[in-house]
Amino acid sequence: MQPLIKVEKLVKRYARRNRGGAQEELRALDGVSFEVFAGTTLAVVGESGSGKSTLALCLACLEEPTSGSIWFKGRDILKFAEKERRDIRPQIQLIFQDPANSLNPRWKALEILIEPLVLQGRISREEMKQRAYSLLGRVGLSAETAERLPGELSGGQRQRLAIARALALEPKVLVLDEALSALDCSVQAQIANLLMELQGALGMTYVFITHDLAMAAHLADEIVVMNGGRIVEQGRVERVLREPREEITRRLVAAVPRMTRAPMAPTGR
Amino acid sequence: MASVLEVRDLHVTYRSREGGQRAALAGVSFDLAPGEILGVLGESGSGKSTLAAALVRLLPANGRITRGAVLFEEKDLLQAEPEELREIRGGRISLIFQEPSLALHPTMRAGQQVYQVLAAHGTTGKSVLREKTQQIFAMVFPEEGERIARSYPHELSGGQRQRVLIAQAVACEPSVILADEPTASLDPTTQMEMLGVLRTLREKLGVAMIFITHNPALLAGFADRVLVLYGGRVVELGPAAEVLREPRHPYTKALFQCVPAGLEGNGNGRKARLPAIAGEASVSDLPMNGCAFEPRCGERMEVCREREPTLLGVNEWHTVSCFKYER
């Protein structure tokens, strides 16, 4: 079987000035390769600054990698001209950590859901409205939500709305960049369940970028562990987290907050 | 031992733009022993940030404390004059907030920002101030205190910035630190490191802490006791090890089940749903009578709608507000 996404030797360099004012090169991605099969979830984990978010932007065609390839359905999308890429972008949607920053605060939910359909311009206004209402239902929001502004919704409802908007163009892949991190534990569980439902119903493929290893273990099939722009370990999520081979993975596993953790040193009174 | 902080029947309401009143805290009581770490566990709308703000009277303009007492070293802060409060805040009771990049001055060196805290709270003499600042940095950054003190916030990592805030918080040797989600924006390795720093400071300085979070797993091995807030009420309070291992309130139980159990998964590939709590804690329409959690509770009974449960002792140290435990 052919993978839906195949990333090969992906490199993204940023130029920046250091304190002395000299040009310096930051290798945000330094030769990253992995595959994702349709209908599965790949977790991408690592500490802050490991290159996770740069990877998300490159996958969603929002950053131009310096070199390497991203094969999507067997074709290298980095070789595409801008016009062809416009057909790819709707199929790979990005969801951010804080939906409060990615939803227009002055638009009602209905307008937010209709906008991508308007931009695509393939169906009538009436059909768009119908689609918007069915999207609300799909993500577990009531029809009354359509008339609400993002500011009138709770964090969980806003993230559901962001997911509904991402689904509007019937994407194949959702890239979720810390999409659960800003939510309360009980709301995280609700959204995680929603993601699993959508995967079951629509065959969605997820790239789940997170620093929450427990949630990665819960949702993902495969995992890649990043550090300094490189993948240091990858494989089945059970194997990597149960028997980590690399020091960095071990460190991340050790830092997972566990309900059963013993008292921290130095011990109490 | 006498408590360093005693909160008695604290009520806070917010005035909405339409002129209505909304209760955010409805009768919160607890005490804090010297050197104790109390974990306050609550989700959005539980009133946890209101609690932190109310304790030091930093509520937003539309918030009002309508009843209760906050006794700090036997003095009621709710009756204190503004002048006294200014001395206590940042001095005897200090605060650590969530976002270190917003809490630090961007164009002032880290050392200067601790120096000024000391100066504002009555330390005088440049050489004394400099020396004290140095000592504080050496304590919070055992390895590179001097370099960090000379750095600007943007030159520091998230974890280092959070440590600078901790340095500010301990500068005046407070008796209580109020920390509102201080590790939420950090990645897990840095998060653990920060909990270790706070634990160490507790050992060294004997400072008590109220550590507010929405993540129960952070409190394991860190807090001495856990207070669970729901709908502006204390629903459970007990020793951390006991509450985390054997929660009694239906809300606490349900909340803990929402957290993925660990890294082991269920072992056989296909994943189970997480047992999420149905619905959301809606702040605006908490029931007027009865238990705040009743609408979402899987174990609700007839009585839960009729009157509000009070805190009952399940043992000497552990209390829970649920009719299930009434006998």
Image (cartoon, helix red, strand yellow):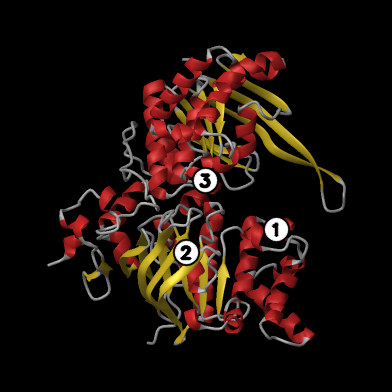
- B275 to A204, vertically: above or below: below
Q: Residue furthest right?
A: A21
Give the camera-side residue of A51 and B53. B53
Which quadrant of the structure image shows residue A122?
top right
Which of the labelled discs sits on residue B50, or is there none?
2
Question: Would you say B18 lies left or right of B8 here?
Answer: right
Spatial CA span between label 1 and label 3:
20 Å
Which of the labelled discs sits on residue A211, or is there none?
3
Nearer to us of marks 1 and 2 is 2
Residue B196 point in image, percent of width and height: 51, 66
Dot 2 crowding, Cα within 10 Å, few <14, some 14–19, many 20+: many
Residue B81 point in image, percent of width and height: 56, 83
- B299 to B323, vertically: above or below: above
The structure residue drawn at horizontal position 29% and vertical position 60%, both measured from the top left corner, is B245
Examine the rendering and report whether any part of residue B66 can be seen. yes
The residue that label 1 is drawn on is B156
Nearer to us of marks 3 and 2 is 2
